[in-house]
Amino acid sequence: MEKQVIIKPVVKSKFSGISALTKSWTTIEGAQLDRSGSYKTGLTSDEERKYEELLNVPKGTLNRKSEFWGTVLGLRLPNDKPYYFNIITPLDEVKLKVMEKHSDIAMNEMELATKPHARFYIEDKEAKAKIEEVALDYMFEATKLFMDTTSEEKKGYLKLYGKRGVEQLSDTIIKTELYKELTSNPKKFIDLINDPDVKIRVSIEEMIEQGLLKKRGNYYNYQDEVIGNSVDAVVAFFKDLKNQSLKIAIESEIKKKKK
């Protein structure tokens, strides 16, 4: 045996830890057709000729229009456990090429992001390591940003996660709750901290919490005036120079209420 690849199911539906597809199978007969009516073989023209010789089949057998591709795979993949595919012969190599082009099978875990409807993926330890490396990099960066924030900033950031009553929490609770948010999604935390409008967004959350800014449906109102139909619109409103006096007045009111 020269090589073995592991094809794993993408388990998306679970109940009580048990896959909804337990003990079921997916059969993939052959290559898929593209819009032009040609099979998605994964082979170049040179590879077609190469494998025709290796398989000892007539010239043109591996042409993308050939019916050969309609039944070349004949895979029966379990939906709840890995399938071990042994690559021993040239035909096995051809089958792997076809699998890699099939919409139901992602070439690795990273490709699942661009193949959201894939039902299986080929295990690739290198690709998996890269995913884990990116996740670690995000975690390190997020943790550094977290450590560089003041207690007051942590309060504000926690409010952006929809937490209410933050002003009544101890610094220890604020710190631990915000760190929980960080660990659940480091990338989101980084984006939040690096948002150039983050201070305004915190102010908006405080205005809402203090009842100085009212949200009715999708609209944000100050007294009887609609100032935006989304958070981004409200941010733009308060960034406008002609509205600075109003922004300062509201923020002063918030400071008084906090005291």
Image (cartoon, rainbow, N blue to C red):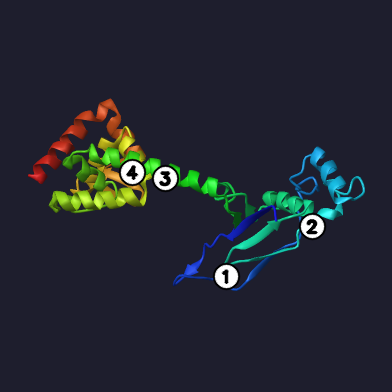
Q: CA distance from mark 2 to mark 1?
A: 25 Å
Q: CA distance from mark 4 to mark 3?
A: 13 Å
Residue ID for mark 2: 72
Q: Earlier in the sequence, mark 2 or mark 1?
A: 1
Q: Which type of secondary structure does the marked residue at label 4 adopt?
A: helix
Q: Which type of secondary structure does the marked residue at label 3 adopt?
A: helix
Badges 4 and 3: C-beta atoms under 8 Å apart? Answer: no
Quarter-wise, where is residue 221 in the image?
top left
Residue ID for mark 4: 189
Residue 203, how many percent across, how many down? Answer: 23, 40
Mark 2 neighbour class, 10 Å CA radius: few under 14, some 14 to 19, many 20 or more: some
Badges 4 and 1: C-beta atoms under 8 Å apart? Answer: no
Mark drawn on residue 21:
1
Give the position of the C terminus as an image quadrant.
Answer: top left
**Amino acid type, mark 1:** Leu
Q: Which type of secondary structure does the marked residue at label 1 adopt?
A: loop
**Amino acid type, mark 4:** Phe
Q: CA distance from mark 4 to mark 1?
A: 35 Å
